[in-house]
Structure formats: structure tokens, C-alpha cells
Image (cartoon, rainbow, N blue to C red):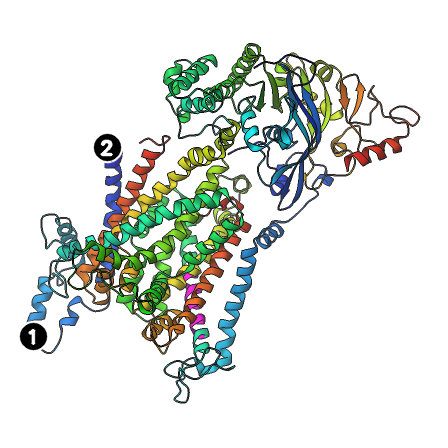
Amino acid sequence: MTRQDDGTPLLAIKNLQTHFATADGLVKAVDGVSFSIRNGATLGVVGESGCGKSVTALSVMRLIERPGRVVGGEILFDGKNLVDLPDDEMREVRGNAISMIFQEPMTSLNPVFTCGSQIAEAISTHGGITGDEAHKRAIEMLTQVGIPDAARRAGEYPHQLSGGMRQRVMIAMALSTNPDLLIADEPTTALDVTIQAQILELMKALRERNRMAIMLITHDLGVIAEMADDVVVMYAGKVVEQSDILTVYEHPHHPYTHGLLASIPRLGEKRERLEVIKGVVPNPLNLPAGCLFRRRCPNAMPICEVAPPLQEIAPGHLSRCWLTPAGDPPSVGEAPGTDAALVAAAALSVEQ
Amino acid sequence: MASYILRRLLQAIPIVIGISVVSFLIVHLTPGSPVDKFRTPRVSPETINNLIRLYGLDQPLPTQFVKWFTHFWTFPFDNSAWGYSFTDGLPVRDKIFARIPSTLWLTGVSLLVTVIIAVPIGVLQAIRQYSWSDKIITTFETIGYAMPTFWLGLMLKQTFSVQLNLFPLFGENSFGKNGDILDLLWHLALPVTTLAIIQIAGWSRYMRASMLEVLRQDYIRTARSKGLTERSVVFKHALRNALIPIVTLLGLTVPALLSGAAITETVFSWPGLGWLSVQAVTDRDYPVVLATVMIGGVMVILGNLLADIAYAVVDPRITY
Amino acid sequence: MTRSEGLPVPGALPAQSTAEVDEVDLVPVRTYWQLVRKRFLQHRMATIALVLMLVLVTSAIVFPIIGGDAWYKTSLTYGPNDPSSLSAPLGYDNLGINIFFRLMKGLYTSLTIGFFAVLIIAGIGTTVGSIAGYVGGWVDNVLMRVVDIVLSLPTFFLVLMFVAFMGSGNVFVIIFAIGLTGWTTAARLVRAEFLRLRESDFVQAAKALGASDRRIVVRHMIPSALAPVVVASTLGIADSVVTEAALSFLGFGLRPPEASLGNMLTNAQDYFYRQPLWIWYPGITLILVVLAASFLGDGLRDALDPRQRIEA
């Protein structure tokens, strides 16, 4: 099911807005997010808990549940806008062209059905084969994801398997339909470190074999470094920085990205203590005006009272910060600080 | 499994003894003596003393208890094991056994009706949570839950027996129609409706809650992410899990099947165990009272055990 | 179910702010009680139920005072055939007693029974539950076996026996019978809450700071464990009122001239044919009490103890 690379991205999210009408007020969990994924490429989406990265993924799958709703934007996949696709057509995309694996292998499998039957179900839903054949294919998939004695394991219930094994079952299930895009939402977070590495290796190997694109959601920049080609950094429901992996690691621009990078321990580096980003993510019900990061930002300046736009600071490198591409505070008369008020006004009109 | 059941039965022994002590004490510490009602001018003091000796009432309480308790468990072989009724002198065991079929008819049929109606209602409400149908059904459930059984029974009786004359006022069979199954069902209609309305209110609420709990589990999201139809997600993946606590509830309901529905039976003069026990309390027929409390308690313990076993059968995660 | 993100739970957010926090970040500071009030008021039925309960309680107190002895005074001038009037909205019964005032007196009695029975339930339940949960070990074991025993006995039948043998028709006996048999659920809830709290950070912290057992239990644990007790008690009022009515129906409740909703229902049975409405008055009143108490209980549970949302 791999398609020709004709330059159009496999998945293009444009100005996605997913809001939750909670009893306490409207939460704009995803607020104007845009990015795209190329065929066969791996995009890492990174950010703290609650920044909207999982909601973005669930929006793509159209698995947002009440009181959440996609209120605006487009999700273009294979020439179709998933946001307004009829339910039955969406079901054919879901689990077939786009598959998803979740963070919690312990709770993501149905406890009352055997692993094999849960994989076979995905296959027979989309593959046109049923019964014994689907079951055989399920066992094949289990072997592919490195489960020893797959035939026996297929007959076991999820609780009889370890967390790492269950995540392998989830991967087998997700890949059983040869998807073009795999969305992996924190696939290794709940696992032991050694198992994490194994699962990442497995995903890499399968990515090569199946030539599929991956949208990898994680808070762990280490995992991103290991896997991703491109990176999207999200903060409080917005994209704050976006670029290819090297640029983000070598020349991060947004202070938040700086903070994230500074907070990972590196081998062979002697530091008294790890940096932490001061403060917490702002309350989604009560977002501050201006730059959402400014209260935690070491570089906060008066202009940050006005929300910065997401602007291209170098070819293919976007950042939502008033700092100049070189990382200096903008001064009047210099780009992009020129007519800062004008830019700010423009930005405001876009944001609201 | 067998060793688990055995262990559970052994664990139940102290509880059974506890139940026996409590019921024994309630009966024996009441003001007055069980033989008081025989004290009329026409009964000689000697007869009274004979009675006291006959029932062992002259012995210290612990002795009486041990005697009664050990004798109690010989009931499979000895029809006097539970003593003789004060009202008619019949063996209590036979009196109680004679009532069991009537009680099973009433409670069994109403439980069946309840499950058949309550489970689909609960599922429907859960998948349409907060919709108008959910809200309306919830209101009815709450009213059903709030209605005292006997009041509902009386109202049904007033409407359908007294005013519309559609169903019989009381009893199990019309005169001379013993064993006629249609006649029995005709008599069953109102008491079963009474019990079923009350039970459906509770069960469908429980089913709704169980289904809602399951529907927000991660594995339901997984099922949806596979592209399954909503029908398959709800009826295959969710329902199978949501029924697990219902099966447990079923196990816990079994004791009520036997100990009967005292109030409903009394309203409709249904000749079951429940009505018998209420009559026994009214008449201070202590041997019958003691036996019914004991049966009730033992049934609860067995019901719990049954619920746990059923749980293991339907939930692959549980093994003993 | 654990989702690291997904649905943001606004109420839970301030709890995360254990790190160094910029004070301005803690914008929505709401106290626990403000949150409780907000959550309760959002529960529309619970708000209605609260109003209804207040109306019922007020009527039960005010009307018997206004009516004086009207609730039991028989009259030869009035009877069932007299039309209702402003002073007797529901007319007169066969003895010429003003039905409305009798109904209000009955409501008063039933609510009193419910209230005191629940006090006993909460008292025993909290004591047993907190001792079992805090002391643990064999004490816990023994107390929980006692709970098992009481739970295994058919509750209503036990009440029935107790009342029948100890003094039927006596208000105090009825209250004690309901109270002594109904405390097990409250005890289990408090125990569970205590087991949870015993391991919780703030109790551990209080221990580490050298607080005494008594202080920890009284100042820290009981207030936290009270939420489920309050909920169970509210629901318990409904149960108690219905139990009283059922006792009356079976002939063990209060006897006329005393008035309770139960004995009014029972007496109305005799007029099934001639005065079919008479059974509706106490019946509807009883249902209103039960409805008000159960919605109130549901609302309180959602407001006080959001974790327990699933009713069972």
C-alpha cells in the first residue's frame, strides 16, 4: 500500500482546533496546530503532559470523545479531509491506512479476548480474510514483532503477557493491516528502560520493512533523537517550534525547546544538576495573554505581552518566539522587530 | 478451583456460627418466654413445665445453643431437626420445604424478567449517555427505586385487580385449579410485575454504570482505533466486559431467590417463604423464625461464593 | 485507565504544582468548598432535591405547630364526604381527622425516625470503620468478620424480628433496629477511606512531624473519610423512611393515634374501594422524601467525592 512520493505530504494538518467544553469552561487543547508528515518519514511530536500532542493524534484518528470536538481546521490524508469524512469512510481509514498504538499496553488490550483474536479482528475488519486465515496471519504478525512461540501466545489473554509483550501485540495489531501511517502515542513511556530500547528497535526495523510513516508522540527527546526525521515541539496547544531533527538539536530557537534539551541528561557530560524548566504549564482554562510560555521563560521581554506568531526563522525552521533568528532580543528597527506592534496586531488577529 | 471452594467453605464456618449466635440471641433474649402464649387458665402449670422441659428452656443458654445448633444441621435426615412449629406443631423443616416451590416461582420469574429488560435498557442508556432517552429512563428508574415495594404492590392491586378486575387479588391458584400452570402464571402476573419494576430500576442503573465504566476504558479506544463498527465496539468489546459485574450481582441475588420477597408475598398473600417468615414473626413462632434467619444467612454466604465462582468463569483474569 | 494527557482535568491541575511555582501561575485558586459547591450546583437534580428536602422538612416542622392537635383530633361534624377547604386541603378521614395535618405529622415522625436512625448508622459506622482502618491487624480482621456476619443476615428481616420481639409500635425500638442493622456499609466505606489515607502523603507527613495517633485520626483522617459517610447517610434516610413504612404495613410500626407515613398508608388500605385517593397522599409524600434524599445523596457524592462517581 505504499504510494509514490509525488511531493505532497502523506498527512497535512492545517490549523487544527480541538476544544473541550468542560463543566469548568472551554479548554482549547489543540489551538491552531499545523504540520505535515512526508511519506515514509518519522515525525516526532514532543511536549510536556497536557500540551495537546495526544489530542492532536486522537483528532487525526477522529477518536476525540465528548466533551471534546474538532472545531476547526483540516486534516488532509490521501487527498481526503478526515475532519468531515463520513463515519463509515473514516472507519475504513482507521486501523487500515492509519493505525495507532497507545501509551498503556497494560490497559489497551481487551482483557476478555485472546491476543490472537484481537489481532485477527483487525485483519478481518480490513483485509477481507476471516477465520482461520486471519488467525494464521495474526500468528505471523506476532512472529514478526518478535514474540517467541507465537502460536501459543496467540491463544493467551493479555493479562498473561508482560508489558513489553503486550506492546508488541499492540504493534502487531497496528501493523497487521500494513498502514501508511502509524501513530504511536508514547509507545515506550510505560515500559522498563531495556524494554523501551527493544520496542524502539522493533519499530525502526518494521518502519524500514513496511516503508510507513510514523507520527511519534513523546515527552522524551531521547526517543525523538533515536527515531525521528522531523520534530514538532508543542506547548499549551500550539506548535512552538518545528524543524528537522538536526536543526532542533543543534540550533534550537525557542526558549522552551532550549529548556527541554537542557533537561535531558547526557552521557559523558559533567553537570552539577539537570536544568529544569521553572513553573508549570499554564491552566488551560485560564491561559495568559501574550506568549503562553513567557511566565516560565528566561528570556521574557516586554514584547512577550503580545503573542508571537509562528514564523520561519530559517528555511524549514519555524519558531513562535520574538527572539531574532540569532537568538537576540529584537530591537526596534531590526527584523523581525520592525514594526513590532504591527506584527503583533497581525498575530493577534490571527490568534483570536 | 476445588481447593478454593473448600477453603472458602471453611472460612464461612465462623460466619455461620456468628449468624447462628446472633439469631439465637435475638430470639432468646426477647422479653417473655416462648411458652407464654400457652399460659391460659385452661392449661395446667404442669403442662407448661412439661413444655419448658420439652423445648429445653430450663437449661442454660449456651447448652441450649449448642444443642440447637448441632441438631440444626441434621436436617437432611431428621425432619425434627429445626424443631416443631408453635402454631400447628408441624415439623418446621417440612413446613419450610413446602413453601420453596412457590417462592422459587415468584423470585425466579421476576429475576428472569428483570435481567431480560434491565440489561438492554442499561446498555441503551450508556451508549446514549445524557440524551433525552437516557434522562427520561433515569427519571423512571429513580422513581421505581424510590417506590416502596408494598406501596407499588398495593397500587397495582388496586388498579388491576380491584378496578379493572383483570388479575386475581391474592394467592397462587384459583380454587380447585392446583397445578394449572396458566392459572399460576395469571396469579403470578402482579407480584412479578411488582418485584420486577423495583428490581429493573436498580439493575438497569447498575448496568448503565458498568457499561459507562467499560466504555471509557483504553481497550475500547483501541477497538475503535482498529476501525471496528460502533456496533462491534459496543456489543462485542464493551458488553462482554460490562456483563462481568452483572454476573456477580446475579450470584449475590441468589439468596433472595430462596429467602423470598417477604413484602411482596405478604401484599399478594403468596404462599412462599417470605410470607411464612413474616407470619412466624407475627405469631412469635420462634422455631420457624430461627430456621428462616439461618436459611437466609447461609444463602447469603453461598451466594457470595457463587458470585466469586461465576466471576472466575466469565473473567479470564481471575483464577483461583 | 491512565492517560498521561487527553482530557485535561482542570480541578486536578493545582495539585501538580509542587515544583517551584511562579505565583502568578496559580490563577484559578478555588478552595475545596468552593469546588464542592460548584459541582453540587451543576448537578441540577441535586439542587432541585435540596430545595424539595428543605420544603419537606420545613413543612414537617411548621404545619404540626400550626395545626396543634388537629392531627389526631377526631370530629363528629366532619367526615370523608366533606369537601376539602383551605383549613383541610385534603379533607377529613373516616374519624373526622384533618388528613393534611395528619399527613404532615406523619412526615415529621418519619423524617425523625430517618434522621436518628442515620445518626446511629453514621456513629457506629464511623467508629467501627475508623478503628478497623487505622489499627489494622487482628482488630481489623475481627471487626470485618462482624461486618460480614451482620451483612449476611437478611437486614429487613432482622429489623422486623427486633421490632416485633422488643416492642412493636415503639419509635425508639424502630430507630434502634434500623440503626443497629444498617451501619455496615458506612463502616466499610470509612475503613476503605482510612486504609487509603493511612498510606497517603499528608498522613505520613503528619506522622513524621510527630503528631499523635489521636490527633492524626481526629484532625486529619475523619474529616477526609466523612465524605462517603455523609453520602451514605443521606441515602440512608431514604432507606430508613421506607423501612419504617414497611414495618407499619406488616403491623409492627407506630399505631394510631400516632401518625407516621407508614401507618397512614396501612390504614388507607382499608378504604381501598371507597377512598382510593387516601393511599396516594402518604404514598406520594413517601416517594418525594425518598427521591429528594437519593438525588441529594447522588449530588453530594459527585460534589464531595468525585472519584466515586460510579454508583453501584
Q: Quadrant of residue A253?
A: top right
Q: Residue furthest bottom?
A: C77
Is B235 above or below relative to B30? above
Q: Nearer the viewer, residue B41 or B108?
A: B108
**Mark 1 vs mark 2: which is more N-terminal?**
2
Q: Quadrant of the N terminus of chain A?
A: top right
Pointer 1 indicates a residue of which chain? Answer: B
Q: Residue, x 9% and y 77% (percent of image)?
A: B42
- Residue B138 percent across, percent down from the top left: 47, 52
Pointer 2 indicates a residue of which chain? Answer: B
Q: Residue, x 11% and y 58% (percent of image)?
A: B91
Neighbour tally class for label 2: few under 14, some 14-19, many 20 plus, Cα within 10 Å: few
The residue where tag 1 is placed is B44
Q: Is residue A226 left or right of residue C81?
A: right
For the record, the magenta segment spans C105-120
Neighbour tally class for label 1: few under 14, some 14-19, many 20 plus, Cα within 10 Å: few
Give the number of the disc on residue B2.
Answer: 2
Q: Quadrant of the C terminus of chain A?
A: top right
Q: Per the image, is C115 magenta?
A: yes
Q: Is residue A352 left or right of residue C178?
A: right
Amino acid type of the residue tagged 1 in the rendering: Ser
Q: Nearer the viewer, residue B146 or C272?
A: C272
